[in-house]
Amino acid sequence: MSDKQRNADRASANRAAVATGTRLDPWYNTYADRALGMRQSEVRSLFAVANRPEVVSLAGGMPNIEGLPLEFLAEMSSRLLRDRGASILQYGSGQGSDELREMIVEVMRPDGIRGHADDVVVTTGSQQALDLISQIFINPGDVVLAEAPSYVGALGTFRAYQANVVHVPMDAEGLVPEELVRVIDELEAEGKPIKFLYTIPNFHNPGGVCLSAERRPRIAEICQRRHILVVEDNPYGLLGFDGDPIPAIQSINPDGVVYLGSFSKTFAPGYRVGWALAPTAVAARLTLANENALLCPSTFAQLSINEYLRTYDWYQQVKEYREMYHERGRAMQEALEEYMPMCSWNSPEGGFYTWVKLPEGLDAQAMLPRAVTNLVAYVSGTAFYADGQGRDHMRLSFCYPTPERIREGVQRLAAVVRAEAELVDMFGLRGGDGAKPSPGEFAWPRV
Amino acid sequence: MSDKQRNADRASANRAAVATGTRLDPWYNTYADRALGMRQSEVRSLFAVANRPEVVSLAGGMPNIEGLPLEFLAEMSSRLLRDRGASILQYGSGQGSDELREMIVEVMRPDGIRGHADDVVVTTGSQQALDLISQIFINPGDVVLAEAPSYVGALGTFRAYQANVVHVPMDAEGLVPEELVRVIDELEAEGKPIKFLYTIPNFHNPGGVCLSAERRPRIAEICQRRHILVVEDNPYGLLGFDGDPIPAIQSINPDGVVYLGSFSKTFAPGYRVGWALAPTAVAARLTLANENALLCPSTFAQLSINEYLRTYDWYQQVKEYREMYHERGRAMQEALEEYMPMCSWNSPEGGFYTWVKLPEGLDAQAMLPRAVTNLVAYVSGTAFYADGQGRDHMRLSFCYPTPERIREGVQRLAAVVRAEAELVDMFGLRGGDGAKPSPGEFAWPRV
């Protein structure tokens, strides 16, 4: 039985076990309240099925790491183990390796960040930074602000800590400052304390857009004035198709931002190394939480990454990734234009994702099984909202499949959308006259 | 500035930042309740100081991994990266690699465990398994039972989840069944729900003792009857100085036990790989929690360990570790007999630790600065209790220093204890007549 098949079987057994509760699980009544809120994300549920080789997956966010210099990494790894094995295989500091933290300070410079290694906490992927941040800030019921839509993995973690996620609208320039003020005002009027604003300013997941340079100081200023911490998640910042990154919100107000970075997209996810740069006292608490969670991040993984950054032209590697993703992004746009005139979408300038609006009346979640039957997978927009919105959208990833496969996938998906639209027409489920939005128009209404 | 010096400075800055609260931390009023309960463990606070080369550290629990086959690991790692780089550097399953989980089933066989790979969840060290278990089971205020004393890292995690840790006495044969029943009865009478019993049955940290073969079915039966989940933490099980491991509690009642294992002590901690074997439905929830926490454990680390287990005579390596620790344990015993007749202690038959009782009136926590000044470090017994007990004990580790250094350290420590005892005599702080318990007597009263 293949790994993938096993994973598929396991995933469905998991869902069954979690769903059935008391009858199959003698410990059901023992769980904490937060455990009952945890559920498998739509992305993960789909993972096993979407990974079948015959399916074109436009669903996952797996980077394409075929271009990595494996020969170089093999020699590097063997040198590290030979020369420093007894220390790199030992426990390390809960905050992370000094060497790597100093290197991370350099890695953040293109984003305009002038941080100090003492304020960097190394985590097991930036997902774990989200977990630690949730752990130290979120009491059950606390409000967390997030863009509408937002990263599914962050929403899952916030849910696990029983946060009340309130979405703030975004448009083609990212988070809308006026909407942010409106939402804060409403929440304050209701007496609901806001713990932080979670935002992905660059090549948004799933939105594909960037928070514009003009808006960044406004967002920073609003949050500073209202004393709201900003959690700035930036895994894709260096993966813009051209040009330099827009300076991070952190660079505008370092005392008010926890900035998250990751090596998963610019190098490789298999090491599981990310980081948080935080105001000093927050960094100290994150370190404590990190020690509670896993004593220390993997020394081997950290020093492997440090050595790679130190001895390889990693920025050139990032440029190669960028070109590769640019080509795939273009393939996605061209295929959408050719096959999906009935939908609208945005044109991302970097990152991994396109956010596509379906014709009126179609439901991305309900359509998914039909898509998978037609050997193409995507993620329903509903995965990216805490409140059930998003049925009219789907996220298409262009990071992993080749341009040819992307084209093939979009073509298959177009057939599914057409068939679904016919069904909707036939049963009169559509509200309006189905007038299609212009292709290239941003997929959610400007405000 | 050296790494260690930096760590020391950082650690003290951390403590200052965490301690001072509002004045230095603009986000102080934003933290979750649980964050305010997190504090640096006594072990961690000491880490930087105790690691200075001139100090003999009998404090840490770092394994001695000098004996690892680094040349073999270097070649293995380079082969893995060359042949399978694109998959081992990619994201993997949240439950952990299939290959490794099947190997883990084999690794548990000497403990009498007949588990299934589907019920194994790979974690980032077994510390993270403790974190996930806490996350899915502990509501604030819930009772967790733990031996008196218990592992400092577990107590820190339970505290972070705001558990109410209730200690159950142990003696030279481990957890006392009658005491367990008494404590459960008392808690039930008070209407306090018990979430689980946390126990370290083999070469207890810090107690050094094993739960006897006779008591294991009794403990299993008591917990089964009262419907209390057992969390059986077994990092040292294969490190008995001679003979085979006693069968795990899990092997007696698989449906009622979450068993935790780790490669940190039998192989190397720097990969950060541990695991939980749990009843199927609990394993499914742990997988969900793992995905929330960090998406997936490091594929590279998992497959490195899998390859090591598959291609190296790892059990022979464990035997070599065993002999090395046996020699060090003996050195510790001999030094205690020679230099510390005023104290009492137990004679562990495996693992890393000896639990030492001080002469009456001495306070291990208060004595520590004097010990460090005298260039020897230990951990005060207070670290291992949730309720402030333990001042009359210290944990001495024999895992990391050489036999010569152990001897030197115990000699230095003896001078400190003598000087402290004179002070106590001088100021009349001692309660009784200071009659010394017999060396070799178990350090806490039998019940």
Image (cartoon, coloured by chain):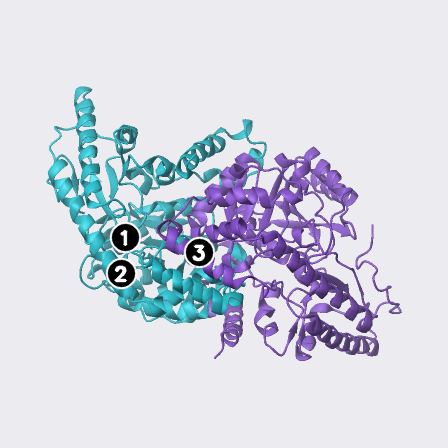
Chain colours: A cyan, B purple
Which chain is disc 3 placed on? Answer: A
Marks 3/2 in contact by CB < 8 Å: the verdict is: no
B120 and A218: which one is in front?
B120
Judging from the image, mark 1 belongs to the subunit labelled: A
Percent x, y for residue B221?
Answer: 72, 36
Marked residue nearer the N-terminal end (3 or 2): 3
Q: Is residue B265 left or right of residue A430?
A: right
Q: Which residue is mark 2?
A: A318
Q: Position of residue B271 (x, y in %)?
A: 50, 57
Residue A180, disc: 1
The residues bearing labels 3 and 2 have C-alpha atoms spaced at a distance of 21 Å
Residue highlighted by disc 3: A124
* B99 vs A201: above or below: above
Evaluate whether label 1 is on the same chain as label 2: yes
Q: Amino acid at mark 2?
A: Val
Q: Which amino acid type is shown beneath numbered disc 3?
A: Thr
